Every structure is written in structure tokens, then in C-alpha cells.
Image (cartoon, coloured by chain):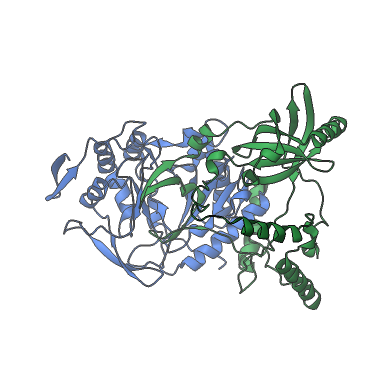
Chain colours: A blue, B green
């Protein structure tokens, strides 16, 4: 195994298998992945900060077996930050906190191509700081259908004086976030609210939307998965790479941009590749920053 | 109360497949229908709290979560915790093309087919315009006691099938491939001499018990008892009802629903 030792913030890190191609049909090695995360670090780190990160690891690349790692690997460097969380079954679990560049590079050296995070921080696991609508297209629908649903959702939420932000999932869907950032909010609130919204969307746009989990109902529709608003669930972190054939990123979009793209055409035009992700983030800044800071209260609860 | 219909009450023809059955110059349009309805009584599992029908979900013990369909992939187990991944596309690439014909390639004597090869029976029902040719085929096959052997794609699988005539109708029986049949060589004991006397005794015993095959004499007694019990319970007590499904009106706090409705009205007006 080839190794290379680098120093970040005065800490030595031994990186392995840098030449290994982890996106074989595209040609993107572990070195490329580390380089992507190094360059996007400024933008992704605030969204990872203090969250119990789930590592989705692809040691043999995106075409091979992967595994989820919720517990922080025991062979971690002694400086790696962790948190103790209690799972639903009461068991204690040590999780990784990826709060700085060296931690990010360390978890990426483990081929954690995808980083998934809960909607709450590890210190307050029952307080979601945002509400999410996970828009998932059925077999015969695509991201353009999701875009239509997302735009209606935005308008509906805005009638209730709630600002929302949207990002691509990096796979087939879109994620609409409603920033909350109030310590009084509970998952019970976000679940109740998002379920009601999904219900009214389904009722008013029955040909476009379903709020039902069952797959037969989905087909040509967009499934609004409100049940992601749960302390046990995780979402792909904004700016994380996705394990697809190409290195595509879960990336924030401006609403105006989505409006322009929502028409007919190639669904892939909404996808953002790693290189574009870096240049756009450097130019425009973090379009998802509002999700972390804007305080909003869910009305009528 | 149509949930308590007995078998035979519902004989509506629901085609599983339609196409033509053909050999040499004959082509008969037909529909494939079930020939048997499994006799066991099935129950739905309900949540005891509110009688919601329950669903099966896939669970990931490692991550401790339910796994949605888009995160599932097939793996062929080659050893403990070792799998070969296979995608839908790959599976599709090796699946046979759907066929619209049951092409009989040879006629065989049905007596030559060991029932061990029988997999699943269906009926073939003539479609419009095929009645006459159908009847002709039924009659000739019945008289000669011959069955047509054909290859036929149903679902994703290519089956070897026998088309035979029953009384007045054509039945299609999917057959097992020979590689699916397990060997019986080791079953028959090779040791021990058989006495002629003993052989005779068994022969007489069998002769005494000879009868015509009359399946009506036998019935699934447990099934019948369960059906009787259900009928009795249905009379005594109203059935429990599942709650309204989610997404219907009034899901959530009343004020929120009212506000959402009003907002939705505005959204629709402005679009």
C-alpha cells in the first residue's frame, strides 16, 4: 500500500492509496477526492460542525460494496474530536465530529465519499435546526418534476412567511430546507408541520405529488418524504460528493436558477460536478449559509 | 361483506398473459389464466392499536434504520459477508425478451412426462376469433393424448411448458427444467432380497383399495373450519376498520391546515 504523510494544522496524517481510482467509469482517484474536499472545506465544514456524521464508505470505489459507519472508527487519531450520543435503543455510541480540515481529510482518507448528517447537532439531538422536504422522484419522474414541486413548496412556505433553501441531492432528487435555528423546536413540530404540508401538496397536485411511502404510488410522481424530519434520520450533507458514476455533488441552487432550469430538457443539467461545485462556491459563497443561521418559527402549531 | 366469498364464486377471467399459441400454420389467439387458487386462508397483519394494515420494510441492522428502495441493491452471497453486486440493468440484460407466442416445437406423449416435472398449471382461454381452431386443437389432442411442448416467456423467466387438453379446454403446465430435478438414485435401497410371496401380498392389498381418482372426496378441512369461523364472527360483530390514510384532509392541527389551504389557494392563483 502506498502511503504519503502530510501535515495539516501541525498534525501529521498518513494518507493511503492515493492513486486508487474510486470512480472507475469516470476516472477520479482518492487523491482527487481529497483534493475536492480540501478545496470545498471552507464551505462544507460549517454544515458538518458538531453533527454526528455518518460515513458512507466505498473502500473499493463507487461500483463496489459500501458500508455505513455511524460509530467513529476506533483506530482514529488521538486528536480526532468525537461526541457521545445515545441511540433510540438507549445504547451509547461514540461518533466522529468533523469540525476541521484535518478531521475532514482523515475521514476522506477512509474513502468516506458520502457524508450524511442529522438535522440536529450532537449536543442537542432532539432539536432540529431545520425542517426538510426530501423530494424523491418515482421511476418515471425525474429531477425536473422535483423542481416543479420545489418551486410550489417555496411559494407555499413563503405565504406562511417561511424562507426556504434548495439543494440537489446529487442523485435524482432535490432537498428543500426551512431554516429554524431555535432551541424550542422539536422533531415532533417539524414532523407535524412537514406532514401537513406534504398532505396539502398531494391533495392539490395529485398528478405530481405523493406523500405516501409505498412505491406503487410513486411511479410518475414526486414523493415528498417528510418523515426525514426525525432524530434518527440523516441527510446527505450539502457539498458532499455522491457515489454515482461521475463525481457529482449535493449542491445548493438559487431559486432563480431553479426557475430557469425547471423547464423541459435534460434532467442532468441540474447536476453539479465537483469542479463546478468548487468554482461556484468560491464565486458565490455558501448559498446554504442561511440554513445554519436564519431563525424562523413554525406558525400555527 | 364480499371478503367472505367462497372459492368458485369469483370465476371472472383475469388474463395473466395474452398472445397466440401456434405450430406450423396454426395460430390461435388465447389468454392465459390461473388454473388453481391456493387454498390457504391468508391474513393481513394489523397494528393492534388502530388496525392499520402493516407493511414490510427493509431494515439495516448496521445503521439501525429502515432502508428506502433507492438505497437497495442486489447481492449474490458467495460466502460469509461476501457478495457480488448485480444491478437491475445487468439482470435485465440477461432476461429473455417478452414473447407474444407460445410456439409448440414438438408433440409428446403426456404419459412420458413424470409428474415430478410439473410446476404450475394454467388454463388457456380462446380469445375472439380463435374459438373454432381452439376447439379443433382440444379435440385432436384429447383423442391422440398428445401434448405440445413449447418454450414460453412469462414474467422474466423462460419456461418449458406442456400444452395439453383437459376435458374441453387447453391447459398449460410449466415444467421444471431437468437440472432442477434432484436425483433419486440414493433414495431407493439397494440391499435386501424381495420375496415373491411378500410381493403378492402387497399387490393384493393395493388391488383391494383401488378406486377412481375422485378429488372431490377430499377437502382442506382446516380451511373450511377457518371460513366457517370467519362467517360466524362476521355475523356476530362488525369488522374493525383501519384509520383513514395519511395525506387526507385534516391531517395536522386545524389552524395549520386552514392556513395551508388559504396559502395554497393564493399560490395557485398566482401561478
| Residue at the far right in the pictured view | B132
Residue in view at x 74 percent, y 22 percent:
B24
Q: Please, is residue B76 above or below residue B144 in the view?
A: below
Locate residue B22, reporting x and y percent. 74, 27
Locate residue B225, reporting x and y percent. 74, 71
**Where's the N terminus of chain A, which quadrant?**
top left
Who is closer to the viewer here, A152 or A220?
A220
Q: Please, is residue A271 above or below residue A299 in the view?
A: above
**Total numbered labels:** 0
Residue in view at x 20 percent, y 56 percent:
A76
Residue A166 vs residue A13: left or right? Answer: right
Is residue B39 shown to the viewer in this render? no
Who is closer to the viewer here, A115 or A294?
A115
Locate residue A221, reporting x and y percent. 61, 45
Q: Please, is residue A122 above or below residue B70 in the view?
A: below
Quadrant of residue A18 within the rendered picture? top left
Amino acid at each position: 500500500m502506498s502511503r504519503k504523510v502530510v501535515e495539516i494544522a501541525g498534525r501529521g496524517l498518513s494518507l493511503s492509496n492515493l492513486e486508487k481510482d474510486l470512480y472507475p467509469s469516470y476516472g477520479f482517484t482518492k487523491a482527487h477526492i481529497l483534493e475536492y474536499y480540501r478545496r470545498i472545506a471552507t464551505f462544507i465544514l460549517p454544515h458538518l460542525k458538531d453533527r454526528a456524521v455518518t460515513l458512507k464508505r466505498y473502500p473499493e470505489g463507487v461500483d463496489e460494496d459500501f458500508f455505513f459507519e455511524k460509530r467513529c472508527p476506533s483506530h482514529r487519531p488521538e486528536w480526532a474530536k468525537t461526541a457521545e450520543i445515545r441511540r433510540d435503543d438507549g445504547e451509547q455510541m461514540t461518533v466522529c465530529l468533523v469540525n476541521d480540515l484535518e478531521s475532514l481529510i482523515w475521514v476522506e482518507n477512509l474513502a468516506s465519499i458520502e457524508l450524511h448528517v442529522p438535522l440536529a447537532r450532537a449536543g442537542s439531538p432532539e432539536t432540529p435546526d431545520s425542517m426538510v422536504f426530501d423530494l424523491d422522484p418515482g421511476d418515471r419522474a425525474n429531477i425536473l418534476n422535483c423542481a416543479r414541486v420545489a418551486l410550489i413548496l417555496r411559494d407555499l412556505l413563503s405565504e406562511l412567511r417561511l424562507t426556504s433553501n434548495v439543494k440537489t441531492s446529487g442523485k435524482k432528487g432535490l432537498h428543500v430546507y426551512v431554516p429554524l435555528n431555535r432551541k424550542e423546536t422539536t422533531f415532533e413540530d417539524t414532523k407535524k408541520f412537514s406532514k401537513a404540508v406534504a398532505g396539502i401538496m398531494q391533495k392539490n397536485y395529485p398528478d405530481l405529488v405523493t406523500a405516501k411511502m409505498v412505491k406503487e404510488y410513486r411511479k410518475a410522481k414526486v414523493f415528498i418524504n417528510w418523515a426525514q424530519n426525525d432524530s434518527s434520520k440523516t441527510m446527505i450533507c450539502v457539498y458532499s460528493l455522491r457515489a454515482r458514476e461521475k463525481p457529482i455533488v449535493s449542491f445548493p441552487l438559487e431559486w432563480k436558477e431553479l426557475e430557469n432550469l425547471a423547464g423541459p430538457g435534460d434532467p442532468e443539467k441540474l447536476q453539479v460536478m465537483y469542479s463546478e461545485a468548487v468554482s461556484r462556491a468560491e464565486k458565490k459563497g455558501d448559498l446554504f449559509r442561511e440554513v445554519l443561521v436564519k431563525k424562523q418559527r413554525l406558525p400555527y402549531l | 361483506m364480499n371478503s367472505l366469498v367462497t372459492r368458485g364464486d369469483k370465476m371472472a377471467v383475469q388474463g395473466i398473459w395474452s398472445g397466440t399459441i401456434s405450430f406450423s400454420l396454426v395460430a390461435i389467439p388465447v389468454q392465459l389464466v390461473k388454473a388453481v387458487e391456493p387454498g390457504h386462508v391468508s391474513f393481513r397483519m394489523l397494528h393492534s392499536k388502530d388496525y392499520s394494515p402493516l407493511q414490510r420494510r427493509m431494515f439495516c441492522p448496521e445503521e439501525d434504520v429502515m432502508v428506502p428502495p433507492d438505497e437497495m441493491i442486489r447481492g449474490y452471497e458467495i460466502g460469509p459477508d461476501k457478495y457480488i453486486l448485480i444491478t437491475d440493468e445487468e439482470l435485465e440484460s440477461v432476461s429473455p425478451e417478452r414473447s407474444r407466442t407460445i410456439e409448440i416445437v414438438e408433440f409428446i406423449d403426456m404419459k412420458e412426462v413424470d409428474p415430478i416435472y410439473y410446476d404450475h398449471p394454467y388454463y388457456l382461454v380462446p380469445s375472439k376469433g380463435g374459438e373454432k381452431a381452439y376447439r379443433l386443437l382440444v379435440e385432436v389432442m384429447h383423442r391422440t393424448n398428445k401434448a405440445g411442448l413449447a418454450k414460453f416467456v412469462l414474467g422474466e423467466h423462460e419456461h418449458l411448458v406442456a400444452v395439453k387438453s383437459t376435458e374441453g379446454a387447453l391447459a398449460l403446465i410449466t415444467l421444471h427444467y431437468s437440472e432442477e430435478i434432484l436425483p433419486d438414485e440414493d433414495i431407493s435401497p439397494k440391499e435386501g432380497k424381495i420375496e415373491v410371496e411378500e410381493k403378492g401380498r402387497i399387490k393384493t392389498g393395493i388391488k383391494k383399495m383401488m378406486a377412481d381418482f375422485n378429488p372431490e372426496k377430499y377437502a382442506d378441512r382446516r380451511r373450511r373450519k377457518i371460513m366457517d369461523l370467519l362467517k360466524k364472527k362476521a355475523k356476530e360483530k362488525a369488522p374493525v376498520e383501519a384509520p383513514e390514510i395519511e395525506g387526507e384532509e385534516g391531517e395536522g392541527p386545524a389552524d395549520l391546515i386552514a392556513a395551508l389551504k388559504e396559502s395554497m389557494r393564493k399560490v395557485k392563483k398566482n401561478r
